[in-house]
Image (tube, grey):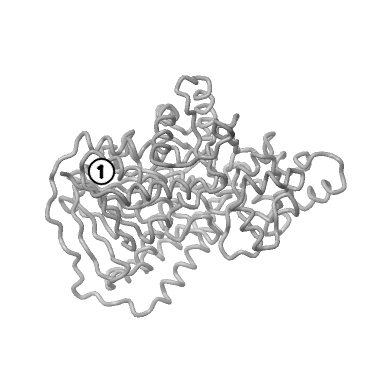
Amino acid sequence: MSRVIIIGSGIAGLFAALRVEQAGHEVIIITKQRPEDSSTNWAQGGIAGILDKTDGEGMQAHIEDTLSCGDGLCDEEIVRCVVEEAGDRIRDLLSIGVDFQKDGDDFHLVKEGGHSARRILHAKDATGAEIERALNNAVSTSDNITLRPHTLGVDLIQRVHGDPSKGIKGIWCLSLDSGEMESIAGDAVLIATGGCGQLWERTTNPPVASGDGLAMAVRAGATSKDMAFFQFHPTALMAGNNRPFLITEALRGEGGVLLDDKGLNAYRLGDLQPEDYSFTLDFSPDGSLATRDVVARACDQRMKISGADYVWLITDHLDKEELHSHFPTIESKLNEYALSLGKAPLPVAPAAHYMVGGLSVDINGRVLMANDSPIPGLYGIGEVACTGMHGANRLASNSLLEAVVFANRAAEHFISESVNNIENVPSWRAEGMLELEEHAPLIRDLETLRKTMTDDVGIVRTFNRLERAKRMLELLSKEVDLIWRRSIPSRELVELRNLVLVATHITEDALNRKENRGLHWNKDLI
């Protein structure tokens, strides 16, 4: 029996765990908080895909929409692979117990920005939570899957120190309950840790999204790819809530419209449809349902011109009862702030949402080195990986699909080539290290990091701002490294160390780009 260590408990990690366990192998899942505290659980929209494998026209349209949204940088082979496997993987989710919403005997499908047709399955506006529920239930009944909550991965253990080509044999991790460091051996490590939205002051990501898996893999010799492309979701609620709350794109798919103050006043006084007054039409004929890169930049520009902290999402022209029925999670959240769908305008603004770039991986999810050779025993799936599916900008609701397809492919690859080759792993060396007595420097450094990324590496960039960010990140990296070398690891220190490294990769990739594509928009290149 071989052993796989999976880092992360979102859709990618849990689905892969079930696949590997079904083949008779041992699985250990480590996750930083509770199993349900993942980006998957926060996903509202849905999973895009064509269930009918004979619907060649529908699949081709999905492929073309994905390629168009990716602005010329998608890997067409990967896109075709994911779209063609969608039906099988969605049926797998159904067999596990995921309950997608139906309209009679058929699934109720919705449309989001960049899609030319309704092809998104959903569980009202809590699709991620429904998928997470079903997967966690399945995992909890397995005898060969051990789930380790409150366990933070710190670093990967190489079979030969300093030589990634020899592979990975385990992981060092920190128990957040006891504060003790532990070594876990495995035949393979599968990274499914999600993204790094905590780099910015405003994000729709959960607190666990601190780039841990990507940073661990890079330190072990992996290479990153397309890190400049970070997606900001255009519509996060700005109603005095301390943490941004996502307003799903499906709401615009049902007719919601974005307006600025001028457009809102014109709409109230005029006799046209609200979309006719939307500032988004200045950026795309698709208006409020343009792709996220376009809509987020449109919102960002209007907010900077007006000095406002938000724009408006209008739904008062839509059927209130249908909105409340289709979007109960959003309606409940809005009610906390005396707002309601189908009534008053909703204040929204872009927020950091999805890491389109990530670890460079092959078609089976194997993590690659700079020479494009795989690191033996190391896989990356889900948001942490850059597969080539999304190109320069992710098409809405393609992320859950990509995650489950690559979870299956990585699991199948491991199963087909699995070996029982567990080696002894070294203990964490802590001689001479001290407990971190003062956390104030870490708090200040994290605030500086987020301020830097928000101001200088946001939706719209310039070379001067990026260079400024690079200098600040170099300083932060040195300061964090000094603390790291003399301190016993804590969650705050591990996360800050990882965030600074990931921020550096994002900034350097942005500096090296000489054209504007998708989510990377540099005013100096216009």
The answer to whether 271 appears left or right of 452 in the picture is right
Which residue appears farthest toward the front when viewing the image?
A: 104
**Is residue 112 at least partly visible in the picture?**
yes
Residue 187, given in percent of the width and then of the height, sits at 18, 46
Query: Quadrant location of the C terminus?
Result: top right
Q: Residue at x 42, y 31 (%)?
A: 82
Pick whichever, 247 or 91, lies toward us. 91
Q: Residue at x 33, y 60 (%)?
A: 149
Pick whichever, 177 or 428, lies toward us. 177
Query: Quadrant location of the N terminus?
Result: top left
Say which element carries label 1: helix
Residue 163, given in percent of the width and then of the height, sits at 19, 48
Q: Residue at x 38, y 68 (%)?
A: 492
Residue 119, given in percent of the width and then of the height, sits at 55, 32
- Which of the 4 image quadrants contains residue 361? top left
The answer to whether 487 appears left or right of 266 in the picture is left
Q: Which residue is mark 1?
A: 21
Residue 483, given in percent of the width and then of the height, sits at 32, 71
Residue type beneath disc 1: Glu
Q: Residue at x 22, y 46 (%)?
A: 188
The answer to whether 266 appears left or right of 376 in the picture is right
Pick whichever, 487 or 125, lies toward us. 125
Crowding at mark 1 (Cα within 10 Å: few <14, some 14-19, many 20+)? many
**Is residue 517 at least partly visible in the picture?**
no
